[in-house]
Image: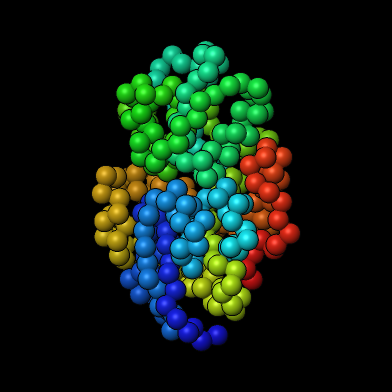
Amino acid sequence: MKPDQIYSLAYSSCPNDTFIFKAIARQLIDLKGYSFNIVLEDVETLNQNADKGVYDITKLSFAAFGSLMDKYALLRTGSALGMGCGPLIISLAGRSIDDKRKPVITVPGLGTTAYHLFRFYMDDLFAGMDTDIIPMSFEKVMPAVIEKKVDFGVIIHEGRFIYQTMGLELKADLGQWWEEKTSLPIPLGCIAIKRDINPAIACDIEKLIRQSIDHAFLHPDMACDYIQDYAQELDEEVIQQHIKLYVNDFSKDIGKDGEAAVTTFFEKARSSGLIQKSSLPLFAC
């Protein structure tokens, strides 16, 4: 279907997203007549802007998408799902979550999948425990723990690769807990499109994202500067670890296991009172 406008496309500066979208951003593939205004923001800002309907196509936490199904539908490409890639609870040495009556815990936003998984975990193992939750942007979580502004932090993204070098200890792997409970991959992030966009256009954009991923894997050295420009604080080894962990077959196509993971995640979120039930279809096409 011939596009009739420029579409706003928003995703994060994390290496997995810039890897996925670099062929679109740098026009290394045939965009089939489509044009995009590209914006990069941190995931929690993307979640908040999606609540306002700011972008046509946007990266979201699956948790945020669960509350935005009236505005957005899922694409089957570009998602971050997988095994062994979930958020971690960390602290300074010698701490235990139950060693204080009301621990102060910082999370990377209340609309994030990390927060939802944290809630599921706490409900399962520490039901009834009173906690003080402080949301902040993900890059501030570890410094807050180190500076003793909070007792524990839930970390995401590249934090899992560097927390030990900062003198922090692992208290719980929320991804491992999820996998043991469900035997399903962890649904972390997704690409969503406004529901009022023609489904044929949504399918075209879904195909473009898949082609962009294929191009990135076939030509990993092309447009490396695009990834590095947005990950200046990370060395090359961490960037590659990040991409390897979060970009996989589920990113190309969410598939049946991915659908089952997302459905299970939303069922648990509804049971925990985090989202409302929706009768709308999950996918745009």
The quarter holding residue 177 reads top right
Task: From the viewer's side, name the closer residue of 154 and 136.
Answer: 136
The quarter holding residue 218 reads bottom left
Q: In which quadrant of the rendered image does the C terminus lie?
A: bottom right
Query: What x and y, as percent, mark residue 66?
Result: 61, 52
In this image, 190 relative to 229: left or right? right
Residue at image position (30%, 50%) is 231
User: Taking 31 as reference, is 206 above or below it?
Assistant: above
User: Taking 269 as reference, is 50 above or below it?
Assistant: below
Residue with the most extreme bottom position: 2
Q: Is residue 82 visible?
A: no
Task: From the viewer's side, name the closer residue of 109 and 99.
Answer: 109
Residue at image position (31%, 66%) is 222
Query: What x and y, as percent, mark residue 274?
Result: 63, 42
In this image, 53 relative to 224: left or right? right
Residue at image position (54%, 66%) is 193
In this image, 75 relative to 127: left or right? left
The quarter holding residue 35 reads bottom left
Residue at image position (47%, 52%) is 48
Q: In which quadrant of the rendered image does the N terminus lie?
A: bottom right
